[in-house]
Amino acid sequence: MRGEILTFRRSAPGIALARRALPPNVPMAFQPDDIRRLARLARIAVDGGEAAHLARELSGILGLIDQLQAVNTAHVEPLAHPLDVVMASTQRLRDDRAEPAIDREAHLANAPQAEGGLFLVPRVLE
């Protein structure tokens, strides 16, 4: 819904949705009234100074999103997995190989209670 501002107004039968057009090339910005309305809906206490600060912060975040959307990614190949980049670099990772299993008896020897090769723990649910 880029290019318009949605405003919710409470009316007798429910909530009506009003739309205001934004001028072209103007990033969407939050106003302190928008923050107070959202805070009321979320049942969060926000005073005037906080509303103005949060409006600036959220407007800044939306500005960053607009910058990201403006980047031309037409010739960028999507990654199948982010580790593809890591694995192509000079990252030192150990080889994935089978190693001897842990010595169960040695670990159970440190347990306060053990029975039948298992750790016994206190019951937490009745």
Image (tube, rainbow, N blue to C red):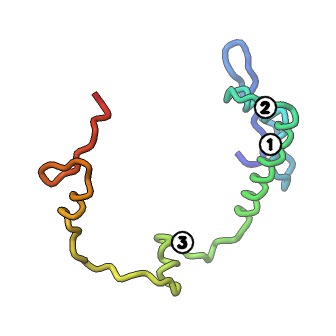
Q: What element does badge 1 sit on?
A: helix
Label 2 is placed on what type of residue? Val
Q: Compared with residue 52, is residue 73 higher up or lower down, i.e. above or below? A: below
In this picture, residue 9 sits left or right of residue 126: right
Label 1 is placed on what type of residue? Leu
Residue 29 image point, x, y percent: 82, 46
The quarter of the image holding the N terminus is top right
Q: Residue at x 23, y 68 (%)?
A: 102
Q: Which residue is under mark 3?
A: 78
Q: Nearer the viewer, residue 50 or 7?
A: 50
Q: Which residue is under mark 2?
A: 46
Q: What element does badge 2 sit on?
A: loop
Q: Which residue is under mark 1?
A: 54
Q: Residue at x 52, y 85 (%)?
A: 89
Q: Compared with residue 79, is residue 88 higher up or lower down, i.e. above or below? A: below
Residue 53 image point, x, y percent: 84, 43
Q: Dots 3 and 1: beta carbons under 8 Å?
A: no
Label 3 is placed on what type of residue? Pro
Q: Nearer the viewer, residue 60 or 20?
A: 60
Q: Compared with residue 105, is residue 40 higher up or lower down, i.e. above or below? A: above
